[in-house]
Amino acid sequence: MSAEFMPLVPTAMLGTDREAASPLIWPGEVGQLTAQLLQAQVSDDGAATRVLRVAAVLASCSIAGAHGAEWTDPLPDAARDETLAAADDGSLPALLAWALQHSSAHLHFEVCLLLARAGRRLPEALLPQALELGRRSTHLRLALASVIGERGVWLATQREDWSFAAGVSVEADIETRWSDGSFEQRIALLHEERASAPDAMRARLVASMDDMSAKERAAFAALLVERISMNDEPLLERLRADRSRDVRQAALDLLLRLPDAAHVQRAITRMAPLLQQERALLRKRWVIDAPAAPGADWKDANLDTPRPKNDSLGERAWWLYQLVRQVPLTWWTRHVGMTAVELLEWAGKTDWSEALWRGWRDVLFAAPDAEWCDAFLDHWPAPLPARDRDTVLGLLPAASRERHWLTRLRDDRESVAAVVSQAIAVCAAGESLSLAMSTAFADGLSERVSRGQIDDYTLRPALTALAATLHPDLLDRIADWPRSGSETPAFLDVMHDVTQIIAVRRALRTLTTPRRS
Amino acid sequence: MTLTAEAILALAPDDASAKAARGLLAPAKWPLLGASDAAVWGECSGSGAKPYQTQVDLAGPSFNCSCPSRKFPCKHGLALLLLRAQEAQRFSAAEPPAWVTEWLVSRAEKAQRKEERQSEKVATPVDPHASARRETQRWTRIETAAQELQRWLADQIGRGFGTLNSAVLQTWHTMAARMVDAQAPGLGTRVREAAAGVHQGDDWPAQTLRRLGMLQLLCEAVSRRATLSPDVQADLRGAVGWPHDQADVLADGEWVVDRWTVLGCVVEERADKLAERRVWLHGERSGRRAWLLEHAFGGRGFETAWLPGSGVSATMAFFPGASGLRALAADIVGPAALPRWPVEPLHDEWLRIARRVALCPWTSTHPLVVRDAVPLRRGSAFLVVAEGRALPLAIGEPDAWRLHAIAGGHPLQLMGEWDGQRFAALTAWRDDTGGAVWTRSAT
């Protein structure tokens, strides 16, 4: 603010034609000078000129004498000393800056994972960018937490929408991290504890459950998937009755992994009478019927999900779908003595095919099973959305997943664009494609790159995503791809990004953990 | 001193050039790469059969390329320096080819010729009467314009700011144009700035008074020009927008040979694709501060790079005037070296500014070094606190957060531009012999 001008402002606003600028007093020598000017009676000087002269004096003196405002408050706490070394070797900061600003979520994850593996943290200058990414992507937050260092934790306290990363010092003891840590720090803590002491982790959850938000209960409960056992059943039974729908669903999904759990056994008991074997001439065949009415215990069994108004399933089919969703897939293969493929085909011949397929798909998403994944992928039921295929592919272990793509590439060389898009869509954060898969893609694309003409609109963006997911051993080969001298501007842009991604990934792989002095 | 990738990309005339330069880092693009103490060079495969011959004179650095690009430096020059910074081992050739040697020799010859021309100009007699007549005519026009402006200023204060609306403000722009017509563009610019500040911020009436007050001071100085000292007259001439001829500055200006630490450098986009670059220097032996002001049109970029946090041995030719800030780089010797930052306490910095304002009140921007400054955030505003004083920080939010992250609530050394109210930080450093840890990005 320009406090020294304030006495003049009323006159300036109203105009000297209506309001005279006197008497006005400023302290000290400046005041004496301005008083002289205001009282000067030079023949051709009007009141306006006198005001302007005073303004000129104040403007000059205020810049000459300005030295900021007085500050008497104590300075806020500064960031703690770092325990991790910054990744500031050579050109790495510039590459990391590019990666955070321009590249995909997949590379962001890899940056975080490889930095964490090398015991390094992001350089300070990149922290605002990194926290901003975390603000936009909740998935990235956990990975970011391990590489922002003490400075990042401190910086996160300075801005409300970065508070997800605030929490406590990364070096704090486990109880402090649990009681005062950010959501991401608590997730990381539970994750670690579940891996080393599953019972302790469960006990921690049980003890704090009443103080948690629904979001926390759902997210923390999902961590029970690691090393799940019948010891977790009582907690899951409790969560199955939670007031939050997300928490209830998380518990039901986890119970599908415990075939001996009482809830699952009850679901099987409900399902079994609907599935009958009948004799047709010399053969026996399985037939299925849908429930005629909901059971009295359905509400307690979480089977009361109302049917959406425009759902393609009728009412009875909807009830059957609800029942199927609670029965583990292994029960079906064991009970009817059919493989997953045979079951999918059998379902197609029944009146309740869509209810069965949808139910099995949901169970597959909750408790993945390789045989069922393969069966679905090889015999995709038409009523199910095609986008679910990518999800099913993503459930498979990488090797099994890639078998599908390699077969397709071998049979149809022109399918490379489609397969690349699929492969990168399901490649989980922090994972890379296998060497065999990467080689197949590189072979499929190198000729097109050397021509300098990637004219496929889907392949161009896929090429950069591919560079971020390729097996690390292939990076050198991609970097040396022969290039045409007549590349189109669009292609040049793509290859620029590819070059940068490769440079980032190579640089991160050379990072070593510095020795602490 | 090795340039960092960040510093090199800061030399790019625009984002597109920086991006294009990064796209040229593939090994296959550069069949030839070489370096010596004085220069780096390379051949870059382009769309034609013959590769582009790109070279950078490390004293500066200064760029040259055989490509047809109008941008300066071009993407090839930037890529060459980036490669040098990132993969120095690829610069295997040590003996410069003929095209490099020829360019370096031609640069040396050009500098020599420039010096000779300068000497010739000094030796060549000009018609003093004609020159004085032209000067008198221009001053007469400026004086007439200043009188008209003074009457107009009084009218505005007489009517009051309460009557200002878009129609009235249009007349301010008309007045600004009249000042330009009267060969006093500096006055016109100040009128336009005053118009732009009306209704902006809570204290706009006070700010408008401040701006009109300074205009009044300028107008009165023009009318009493004959009574002023030659130095103040020279400052006045600059303030009304009549620049001193650079050749005259080189010929007649005060020459200061020193090792200059680049305190800060900022490039700002002005209207009509005009880029303005302000470079602030500190002479290590002389203790002088120097201000280089340059303009470039249409993304052409600037020939010489000034990297904040580097030390440059150079001769500065100072413009005439009491403020003693504005200068031209007359001669740069050798590549950039480590800096020697100024270590004066804040009190001395304030004293420098007060003295400068006393000598030349129209200096609107002052270099300010604030030692042991802690960047803070108070509400939505950014501040720096040092020695019990708080200065409002006037930089964009991304730059402010980056500075905040680098400082982490700990003190560091800052240099920036001070206008009496706000501190536009340009550079931060920690150690007095180390490089910059933060620089403000171009706007």
Image (cartoon, rainbow, N blue to C red):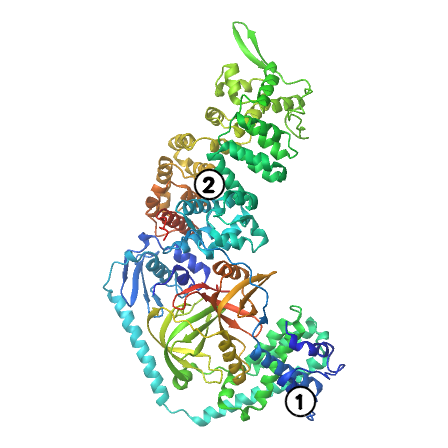
Residue at 42% over, 33% down: A398
Q: Which residue is mark 1?
A: A36
Amino acid residing under circle 2:
Ala
Tell me residue A476's x, y (percent).
33, 45
Instruction: Give the letter of the chain under mark 2.
Output: A
Amino acid at circle 1: Gln
Q: Chain of mark 1?
A: A
Circle 2 Cα neighbour tier, 10 Å, few/some/many (<14 / 14–19 / ≥20): some
* Element type where label 2 sits in the image: loop
Secondary structure found at label 1:
helix
Percent position of residue A221, x then y:
56, 34
**Left or right: B221, with A439 as reference point:** right
Q: Quadrant of residue A445?
A: top left
- Earlier-in-chain disc, 2 versus 1: 1
Residue B51 makes an appearance in the image: no
Residue B183 versus residue A300 in the image, above or below: below
Residue bearing the label numbered 2 = A429
Q: Residue B107 or B383: which is nearer the viewer?
A: B383
Residue B221 visible? The answer is yes
- Separation of marks 2 and 1 at Cα, in angstroms: 75 Å
Lateral position of residue B364 relative to residue B341, left or right: right
